[in-house]
């Protein structure tokens, strides 16, 4: 019985170590976000140079390509952010218009309760977002 218990403990221990990610292999997302695009390009170039054995001429050409790609990516990111902001503003306007129409139908007491219900819903959404962020940080 003791041997079976010891074997079970060893197996559990080995499987928990097998699932750990090696440290240093992958940069964490927070650290990558702190880097400027130039720093990210430089790190990418260093990795490519090491992995592919690039010479000086190839490094210069690759650096040019990486900077062009980075600039395109940044411009597309800015476009997406503008689009998302426009959609957010449109959605807020629609919500305000809907809220105005709803309040025109409701009595003052019902309107007060309506506002309370919306506030509760907003709090629940904030809590869910925080939970998702915590789960994402753990990964």
Image (cartoon, helix red, strand yellow):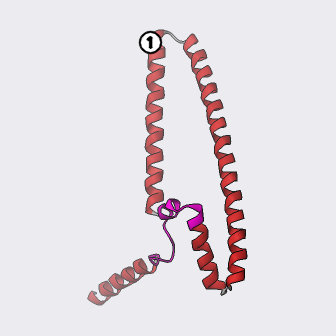
- Towards the viewer: 38 or 18: 38
The residue under label 1 is 109
The region drawn magenta spans 20-39
**In percent of the image, x 55 and y 61: which residue is there?**
36
**Spot occupied by residue 48 in the image (x, y as percentages of width and height):** 64, 79
Q: Nearer the viewer, residue 44 or 30?
A: 44
Q: Is residue 3 left or right of residue 130?
A: left
Q: Residue at x 60, y 79 (%)?
A: 47
Quarter of the N terminus within the rendering: bottom left
Q: How many marks?
A: 1
Residue 105: quadrant of the picture: top right
Vertical position of residue 111 compared to residue 81: above or below? above
* Residue 21 magenta: yes
Q: Residue at x 47, y 64 (%)?
A: 31
Whether residue 97 is situated above or below residue 47 in the rendered picture: above
Q: Is residue 116 left or right of residue 105?
A: left
Which element is circle 1 on?
helix
38 inside magenta stretch? yes
Q: Position of residue 11 (x, y in %)?
A: 39, 83
Q: Residues within 10 Å of mark 1 (few under 14, many from 20)?
A: few
Q: Is residue 88 left or right of residue 58?
A: left
The image quadrant that residue 119 belongs to is: top left
Residue at the (59%, 71%) spot, across then down: 42
């Amino acid at each position: 019985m003791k041997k079976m218990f010891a074997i079970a403990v060893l197996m559990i221990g080995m499987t928990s170590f097998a699932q750990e990610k090696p440290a240093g292999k992958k940069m964490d997302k927070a650290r990558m976000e702190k880097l400027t695009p130039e720093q990210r390009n430089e790190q990418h170039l260093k990795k490519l140079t090491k992995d592919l054995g690039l010479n000086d001429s190839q490094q210069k050409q690759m650096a040019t390509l990486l900077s062009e790609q980075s600039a395109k990516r940044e411009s597309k990111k800015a476009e997406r952010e503008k689009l998302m902001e426009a959609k957010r503003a449109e959605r807020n306007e629609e919500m305000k218009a809907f809220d105005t129409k709803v309040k025109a139908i409701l009595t003052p007491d019902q309107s007060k309760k309506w506002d309370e219900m919306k506030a509760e819903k907003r709090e629940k959404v904030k809590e869910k977002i925080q939970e998702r962020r915590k789960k994402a940080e753990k990964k």
